[in-house]
Image (cartoon, rainbow, N blue to C red):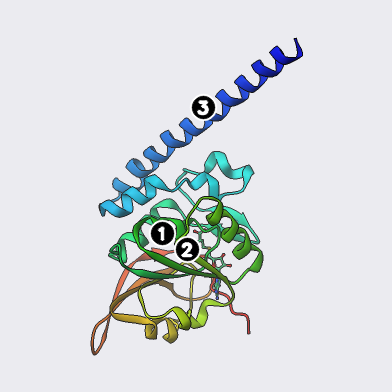
Amino acid sequence: MKYILLFIGSFILYNGAIAAQEDYTTLQKKMVEEQIKARGVADPPTLLAMLGVPRHEFVPEEVKPYAYSDGPLPIGNGQTISQPYIVAFMTEALQLKKSDRVLEIGTGSGYQAAVLAKIVDSVYTIEIVENLALEAEKRLKALHYDNVMVRAGDGYHGWPEKAPFDAVMVTAGAETIPQDLIDQLKIGGRLIIPVGPHNGIRQLMLLIKKKNRIVKKSLMAVRFVPFTRKD
Ligand code: SAH
């Protein structure tokens, strides 16, 4: 009898887990259709990556039911995982190709790094809150994103040992554009960064490094947690 009950119990649990996974898959497809494609993101690798990375694995237990909702979510330490649309928009704007090496500043949960890792060969990501860096590294490893390297530290000066990069993405709001990040771009490299006054609305800027000049474009108004400094 005990074994029968145990069998029935595990059957119910098993089915529960499957149902939840199916729910997440449905919600994820809906997220891509209604929040991302509907707003104009059309780059096929970006859309595939947004369909391929399980966002619910990157958020704390208590907000999992909202993992595919249309907004940022708290990830602890006063930080947030960005709105899915912003993740997709910024990814598309970098015009990535498979062989690219990408630097991200502001690992947070590791979600954006995972999206980038679906598209390009190597992703380097720096997070200033050590606890978040360690958790993201563990999570990315468990989910087999083996082409992501996480470093705990201040990303203001980039990652010179791994430079140059084809693309750099800053996922925290900066007051100015750090020169080191521009210097660490290859010719033809792209940098995307939210810039503006502290705690205000910032402009999402795209910089393209040409041979003798930097082309700057302002893409949209955004709100981001601030870029902080260690010193
Ligand atoms: N990309 C993340 C969300 C970013 S939230 C994700 O997908 O979940 C912005 C992150 O930038 C926060 O975790 C914050 O701690 C980090 N950050 C702020 N200033 C930083 C700096 N100078 N260097 C590295 N990380 C920084």
In terms of image quadrants, where is residue 187?
bottom left
Q: What residue type is labelled 2?
A: Val
Label 2, label 1: how far apart the Cα atoms are: 7 Å
Which circle, 3 or 2, is nearer the viewer?
2
Task: Tell me, yes or no, if residue 156 can be seen here.
Answer: yes
Figure check: 160 above or below 200: below
Which circle, 3 or 1, is nearer the viewer?
1
Label 3, label 1: how far apart the Cα atoms are: 28 Å
For label 2, the residue is 148
Residue 47 in picture, x, y percent from top left: 32, 49
Q: Crowding near pointer 3: few (<14 within 10 Å), some, many (20+)?
A: few
Residues at circles 2 and 1 in contact by the CB criterion of under 8 Å: yes
Farthest front residue? Answer: 3
In terms of image quadrants, where is residue 203?
bottom left
Label 3, label 2: how far apart the Cα atoms are: 30 Å
**Which label sits on residue 117?**
1
For label 3, the residue is 19
Q: Which of marks 3 and 1 is nearer the N terminus?
A: 3
